[in-house]
Image: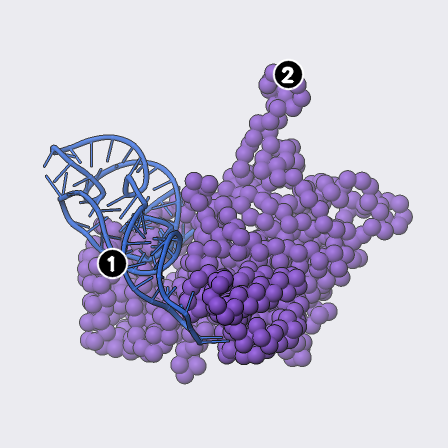
Chain colours: A purple, B blue
Amino acid sequence: MEPRVDLSSQKRAGRSLFFREVSKMPKVERGRSEEELIPLRHSTAHVMAGAVLDVFPDAKLGIGPAIRDGFYYDFDLPRPLTPDDLQRIEVRMREVVKQNVPFVRESMTREEGLRFFAERQQPYKVELIEGFDPDEGAAGGSVSIYKHANFVDLCKGPHLERTGEIKAFKLMSIAGAYWRGDEHKPMLQRIYGTAWPSQADLDRYLAQLAEVERRDHRKLGRDLDLFSIDDELGSGLVLWLPNLSVVREELESWWRRIHHERGYTLVYTPHIASERIYQRSGHIDKYGENMYGPLELEQGEGPLSAERRQRFWIKPMNCPGHVKVFQSRVRSYRELPLRIGELGTVYRYERSGTLHGMLRVRGFTQDDSHIFCSWADAQAEIGGVFDLAMEFMNVFGYSDPVIYLSTRPAKRLGTDEMWDKAEGALKEALECRKVAYRIDEGGGVFYAPKIDIKMRDAIGREWQGPTIQVDLNLPERFDVTYVNEKGERERAVMIHRVLYGSLERFVGGLIEHYAGNFPLWLSWLQVAVIPLKPAKAGDGSGAAARTSEYADEVLAALRGRGFRAEVDHRDADMRTKIKQAQERKANYMLVIGAREAEAGTVSIRPRHGAQEQGVPLRDFLTRIEEERRSKALPPDFHGAGPSVAEAVAEQRAGT
RNA sequence: GCCGACGUAGCUCAGUGGUAGAGCAGUGGUUUCGUAAACCGCAGGUCGUGGGUCCGAAUCCCACCGUCGGCUCCA
């Protein structure tokens, strides 16, 4: 099977489903941590709930916790909320804040609590108390409530002293949310808000949101002609436009080169496969809902009878194919470890409401690899993948990797002995590298423990990165074996890993990470040549023609060295050409006039930074060849934290 | 899939019952210019799709499709 994202740390309100904002970015004044802000945010949620009750006296209260950057509260209301309601609620909240009334805690027995909220017609609160463990709680089965003004809520606190301590908040959005997160339970209306110790903190946070919006890959994708998703073609299916196709081509060639260097065998496997293999792999049973199919295909000649019909499905994962590659003949221990890799395109039916630009799609290409080896080699192989993963993240300028080891879940396949071995191999691989990691107890998937690497992007958001799993399911189901030194069949260990994950999601993330300003090696327009005078013959002096000719020579020199370059011969104002090249995110603009043509130089205008006049063309070429070769991050890139390499070095030094 | 909002030109948006608008982009011309937008013209839309109400619908109602914010789920 394949890596599953651990969602436990991502279950929070955020602007996206795939990352969470790390507190580092909108720094809170006086060094307050997110934890210290919980009472503030939770208290603001209470004030909001009170205001909602003022506006809708019949509202039924759900829950209202503090979350990263703010809070929310769920309500069962007689009608849908409108933005105007949010306004009214916010106005009412400000009144209560101004009144500066105290938050008062009271304690009551479980029975009193049940009666209290039943009387107040708050069925969700009653349900919550009924769900409490009677043996829990300091006072043995007691519940606590908090009051302010005429609002009372079931709550264990803690809260601020008074409402006046709430300084800066804003109601952000309305959303539907299932009661207790269960899609079979009623849907409540959730109001999200944000709250901060000061107006300056709130302003910073709102600026951060604006920055996130500015970098949104869907917007940049349109503006820069990167990708398109067409309704008629099918939602969730990405068209890679020429510009982004360049980025992908570079990513893929580099990926292939690195994998060849590391002893991987690259393969291609079909996009559809018989139902039989997915029955054996367990996909039909466990994953059927997400699969496209079945396709009824005829076998052999003659009328389409039931016997001749065979059912095929579009592949949702690459692993069964790779198992079959391994099993294409008897394997000897001498061939191991066998590292099989593929840029494999898979299709999965995702519910319509979950689609999101390139980050959540229905067809995508994984940089999938399955390593078949013995237990003796497993740890070294895992370590090798880990090192490669870190190298990858470092090249792209991601920072602050956080490593999680997810161990056996309660519901699982396989024996304890196998889990011991699998977890041990992952753990040893990390420990012999002296890498700090966190254990996510029970966070593994039912068939595998795993290592997850998360990292931070340029504005401090944390993304799911590479994942490494030791698969305990497929080798059993497919009876994957090799012949050992003693001539006996032995079960192979199967390590599954992805580095990019999916090209679509990875590149969508890169667009936001770089804010559209790609490093030279990935850029679709590396150099824009801008001749100063239009190419018009017969203007007398011949200077225009010479300039134009020289511009073509410069272009030829660039293209001859494999650079993606264009020359803008249009009869337009140079300033317009510069602006447009800038908007297209050209890494360098070369302004060419009579002076340059005469001296064989170029005037360099980088995408960001100061321009340089009179640089010999040869020097410029040498310079950008080095920049391309080293995959240097662009000068206009600023990471949010220590690079992956620095972070790892630091961890090792500290242990 | 669920809740809510939204869908007008390639893009950003105006237009709320009476003959479809702007800016940018596109295109034709003029301008010949040294580092982020020269000037003038033209063209471009069965107002997401299909039904309905009405003398008349971009505008009101219903269904469907899609997008956005969440929920749920995930690479």
Q: Chain of mark 1?
A: A
Q: Residue at x 77, y 56 (%)?
A: A263
Dot 2 corresponds to which residue?
Answer: A302
Q: Residue at x 60, y 77 (%)?
A: A599
Examine the rendered structure and indicate whether residue A49 appears above or below residue A448.
Answer: below
Q: Residue at x 57, y 27 (%)?
A: A296
Q: Chain of mark 2?
A: A
Dot 1 corresponds to which residue?
Answer: A83
Q: Residues within 10 Å of mark 1 (few under 14, many from 20)?
A: few
| Pointers 2 and 1 in contact (C-beta within 8 Å) | no
Quadrant in the rendering for residue A604: bottom right
Gap in Å between the C-alphas at discs 2 and 1?
A: 64 Å
Q: Position of residue A19 (x, y in %)?
A: 48, 62
Amino acid at pointer 2: Gly
Q: Position of residue A172 (x, y in %)?
A: 32, 63
Q: Nearer the viewer, residue A415 or A560?
A: A560
